[in-house]
Amino acid sequence: MLGAGLAIAAAAGPGAERAAAQGQAPAQASALIEKKVFEGGAFRTRGGATIPNLRLGYQTEGRLNAAGDNAVLICHFFSGNSHAWGQVTANGPRGWWDAIIGPGKAIDTGRYFVVAVDTLVNVNVPDAGTVTTGPATLNPDTGRPWGMSFPVIAMRDFVESQKKLLDSLGVKKLALVAGPSNGGLQSIEWAAAYPDFCARVMPVIAAEIDAWLQGWLNIWAAPIRLDPNWREGDYYGQGREPPLRGLAEAWKIVTLHARDRAWAAQYDHKVPEGQDPARRIGDRFAIEKWLDDTVAARARTSDANSFLYMVRANQLFLNEYPSLAAAMAGAPRRWLMLPATTDRIFALEAVRDFAEVLRKAGKQVEMAELAGPLGHLNGVAGMAPHADRIRHFLAS
């Protein structure tokens, strides 16, 4: 959902869906991608607060040309990070959009300078491969984690922090800004905020965050607040247990919401060995066991407060504009939208409604539908068949 966070790969970790079958041949050996850290200094949020020590992880590949206009920004989904392509370690997984990014691929790092950034309030705080600034970061004024005193972060703050990084790299214009789900929302926010900076926009499995999706985001977050270990966000102290149960239940909602009935059919009527839910109310069906096991592991690799902040950032999508039409009036002309036909978060009809708003504003909108049994997750695992379409979009 939320394009923002929607949490596309909600259940698994930042590399969850990168290992999903993408229909591509085994990748040839290539140079490792270096994970870098941007030290941005003081950062003023759109809400007027100041974060004194902005730090964000990022990765790049390719060379920026003399004009500074061959850059591509890839934005990540709700539960992801900047590892969108390539390998960071020799035996590690490949990035979640590796099917379409790299030398000779649709987004060709031989032609483009490709950048991906860990967002502010990234949920993957325990992951050493993620660098972010958020509620788990130490507040220099207190020497303790910010917790819920961290400033509210809007989707526009993701854009502004990324813009600060791109300026430091010498980028003058983006040939493309793209991403799935939460990354797609960031792409749209970029289009509204910096239309002359973005030549093309490719939101994947993303559209408007309306009141219905804002309500779903609230449901996603609710279990965390109900966990007594959450303690109003004050759980970082020594000897305190994090709200893992509530966080796991939150990921459970996101995980099932992001998938489709066709995917779940593999568990139909199945019961794990030793379980008998018809006789014992505490026993589980196969789908329940899969969800419980999956989200328990995911909870241990994420941060509950960051989850809440990421939810709010999604709810604040395009919040500085009176309407979607107003936000898109001055947006870039060229758009490629890739919805998933079985998406239960950004439904196909919602994406079509968004495309109609763009067309009424005089934009050139192409659309190609992602097929497959994974629902919302087709926007990560199902990109390979659309490589030629993306390549043509970039070249035109």
Image (cartoon, helix red, strand yellow):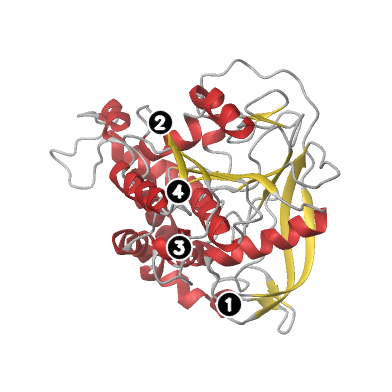
Give the residue type that dot 1 points to. Answer: Pro
**Picture disc at residue 370:** 2
Secondary structure, mark 1, is loop
Q: Are marks 1 and 3 in contact (CB under 8 Å)?
A: no
The residue at the far right in this view is 66
Q: Nearer the viewer, residue 245 or 283?
A: 245
Q: Quadrant of residue 195?
A: bottom right
> Image height check: is 284 above or below 157?
above
Location of mark 1 (residue): 151
Callout in the foreground (4, 3): 3
Which mark is first along the chain, 2 or 3? 3
Q: Quadrant of residue 325?
A: bottom left
Location of mark 4 (residue): 296
Quadrant placement of the C terminus: top right
Residue 186 visible to an observer of this rendering: yes
Secondary structure, mark 4, is helix
Callout in the foreground (1, 2): 2
Q: CA distance from mark 2 to mark 4?
A: 29 Å
Mark 3 neighbour class, 10 Å CA radius: few under 14, some 14 to 19, many 20 or more: many
Location of mark 3 (residue): 311
- Name the residue located 40 percent from the left edge and 48 percent from the top edge: 359
